[in-house]
Amino acid sequence: MKRKDFPKKFEWGIASSAYQTEGAWNIDEKGPSIWDTFTNAKNFTEGNGNTATDFYHSYKEDILKIKDLNLSSFRFSISWSRIFPDGIGAPNPKGVAFYHAVIATCLEHKITPWVTLYHWDLPQKLEEKGGWTNREILHWFAHYVEFCSLEYGDKVKNWMVLNEPMSYVGLGYFLGEHAPGKTGLQNFLPAAHHTVLCQAIGGKILRKNNKNACIGTTFSCSQVTPKNILRRNLNAAKRLDALLNRFFIEPALGLGYPTESLPGLKKIEKYFKPGDEELMQFDFDFIGIQYYFRIVAHYSLFPPILFAKEIPATKRNVKTNTMGMEIYHKGLYKMLKKFSKYKGVKNIYITEAGTCLEDSLKNGTINDKERIKYFKKNFKQVLKAIDKGIKVKGYFIWTLVDNFEWAEGTKPRFGIIHNDFKTQERRFKRSALWFQKFLSKD
Ligand code: GAL
């Protein structure tokens, strides 16, 4: 496989996020985020992101590595509470300066910055007022986006409003496995609805302030396969698909929530205010899809509302990564096809895809052959999609350096560069060297 097999303008990038990399959690007047609170709580056992990969101090070297790997784009997120320590109010000049420095370093090395406005690290002060469950977040978020778009808009063209709403609303406000650790439908439904509104509000503000901006937002997705063709299992898979793949994009496209497939979530309408159907919509220039695994589902009495359960990949005798996710490349093509079928979807970027493996150090190198295979197989699916006329415009590798993987801590290693968390020493894995060669233009 060669770079030349892809269209000339195909964007090759790397993706990361603020909480997983920056560290510097309490310096230079940064305010705490819900992830600082969550991981520093006594009952959290997987460490914390207080230092993470220390990107706050090593951004120059890391961006140079991106250049060295022949990648042309860098997707990173802004930490809301670094800019606004209390979530609202006056901006913190040091936080503002940090992102100017990151952007300037990218531009200096001809790396295109792709900025995500929200990658899960809500300011703790806002969570204390209810966070995503409080409708006031429409104003808090608008204030934050207004500021960022005016401050950085002359240097940044490509924006993503949210990162994977289903993940942070589902894991953070329903299952309680992620920050802020809330559970139940009474939290999930308002958090979901306010997220959908903010998704569109963010897009509209960017459009108003940045005429030439390329505006997107990102969605997690999983191919959902029924266990067999029994009707009850087919229906269970359909419900899971509506929740995992359709719930956050369809309202933006003017299709409303997919409650005909998920009648149990009709209660979300309780949180509607007049005009919300209109407010939920935004004409995105692109959508980002983030694909890691597929799901095999069957009917189950629990949980009610969904009446569906996943059969864990580890029980299905299939290939998995170290987080127990099934490695299933064909699902990437299926998802590209699925999302491209929406009339309102213009362009698609794969804004994250990668995998975590046992990356053991042998004779001074990490020979992650499996990761190279993983990417090659994924790229085949992308080429197939392009061949069928699907407008896939780029691929952002998850991720540059092994980082802090949320509730799993530093165990899962997703980077193409190895990190020693004690010394912050970076070491190119074999996959990084493969990318360097694959992407080289000579
Ligand atoms: C995504 C998330 C990333 C990263 C990745 C690997 O869902 O957006 O921040 O953690 O998963 O698991």
Image (cartoon, grey):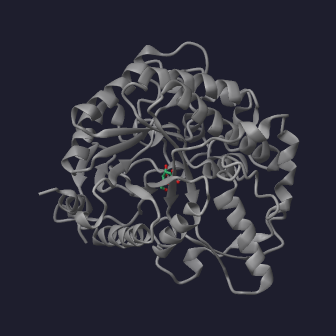
Which quadrant holds residue 441? bottom left
Q: Position of residue 119 (x, y in %)?
A: 53, 41
What residue do we see at 26% from left, 62% from top? 431
Q: Quadrant of the C terminus?
A: bottom left
What residue do we see at 64% from left, 60% from top? 245
What residue do we see at 40% from left, 36% from top? 22
State left or right for residue 164 relative to residue 113: right
State left or right for residue 106 relative to residue 339: left
* Tag count: 0
Q: Quadrant of the N terminus?
A: bottom left
Q: Nearer the viewer, residue 383 or 424?
A: 383
Q: Position of residue 315 (x, y in %)?
A: 59, 80
State left or right for residue 105 relative to residue 346: left
Q: Position of residue 332 (x, y in %)?
A: 49, 68
Using the rendered image of the protein, determine whether residue 213 is visible from the camera's viewpoint. yes
Height in image: 252 above or below 436? above
Q: Nearer the viewer, residue 437 or 369?
A: 437
State left or right for residue 415 relative to residue 61: right
Q: Position of residue 265 (x, y in %)?
A: 82, 55
What residue do we see at 51% from left, 24% from top? 209
Using the rendered image of the protein, determine whether residue 122 is visible from the camera's viewpoint. no
Q: Nearer the viewer, residue 350 or 278?
A: 278
Height in image: 40 above or below 126? below
Q: Residue furthest bottom?
A: 229
Which quadrant holds residue 372? bottom left
